[in-house]
């Protein structure tokens, strides 16, 4: 997880995965004609490539956001330093 906001997504996906482990055998006993979908090698490979591309994109987006926030923090620190210097100069002038 990159952020706390993603926790709900991961909890949902984990819950769906665990429920599928329980429901798949139950469906076979409730509906004898039930046949789970067959996942072939090509489907699996395309799915893994899709996941890899999403992960690559998400990591890049996260890195860009961190860089933007660092630049913003640096700008705010510079601004704060200028304000403090102005206040010190005003105090020195008053004395």
Image: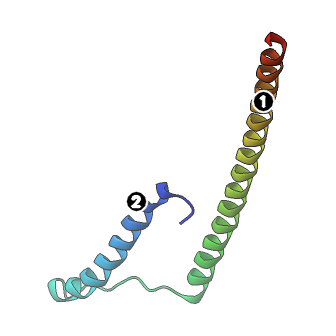
State the residue in front, 16 or 45. 16
In the figure, 77 relative to 31: above or below? above
User: Which quarter of the figure has residue 52?
Assistant: bottom right
Q: Disc 1 marks which residue? A: 79
Q: Earlier in the sequence, mark 1 or mark 2?
A: 2
Q: Disc 2 marks which residue? A: 8
| Mark 1 nearby-residue class (10 Å; few <14, some 14–19, many ≥20) | few
Give left or right: position of 16 versus 60: left
Q: Residue at x 69, y 50 (%)?
A: 65
Q: Position of residue 11 (x, y in %)?
A: 38, 66
Element type at mark 1: helix
Give left or right: position of 52 versus 85: left
Give left or right: position of 2 versus 71: left
User: Which quarter of the figure has residue 12?
Assistant: bottom left
Q: Residue at x 72, y 57 (%)?
A: 63
State the residue in front, 74 or 25. 74
| Mark 2 nearby-residue class (10 Å; few <14, some 14–19, many ≥20) | few
Image quarter where the C terminus lies is top right
* Residue, far top: 94
Q: Position of residue 54 (x, y in %)?
A: 64, 65
Element type at mark 2: helix
Q: Residue at x 78, y 43 (%)?
A: 71
State the residue in front, 5 or 81. 81
* Residue, far left: 30
Q: Are marks 1 and 2 in contact (CB under 8 Å)?
A: no
């Amino acid at each position: 997880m990159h952020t706390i906001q993603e926790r709900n997504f991961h909890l949902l996906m984990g819950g769906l995965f665990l429920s599928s482990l329980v429901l798949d055998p139950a469906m076979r006993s409730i509906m004898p004609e039930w046949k789970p979908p067959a996942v072939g090698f090509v489907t699996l490979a395309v799915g893994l490539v899709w996941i890899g591309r999403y992960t690559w994109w998400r990591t890049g987006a996260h890195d860009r956001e961190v860089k933007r926030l660092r630049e913003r923090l640096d700008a705010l620190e510079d601004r704060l330093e200028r304000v403090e210097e102005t206040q010190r100069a005003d105090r020195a002038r008053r004395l």
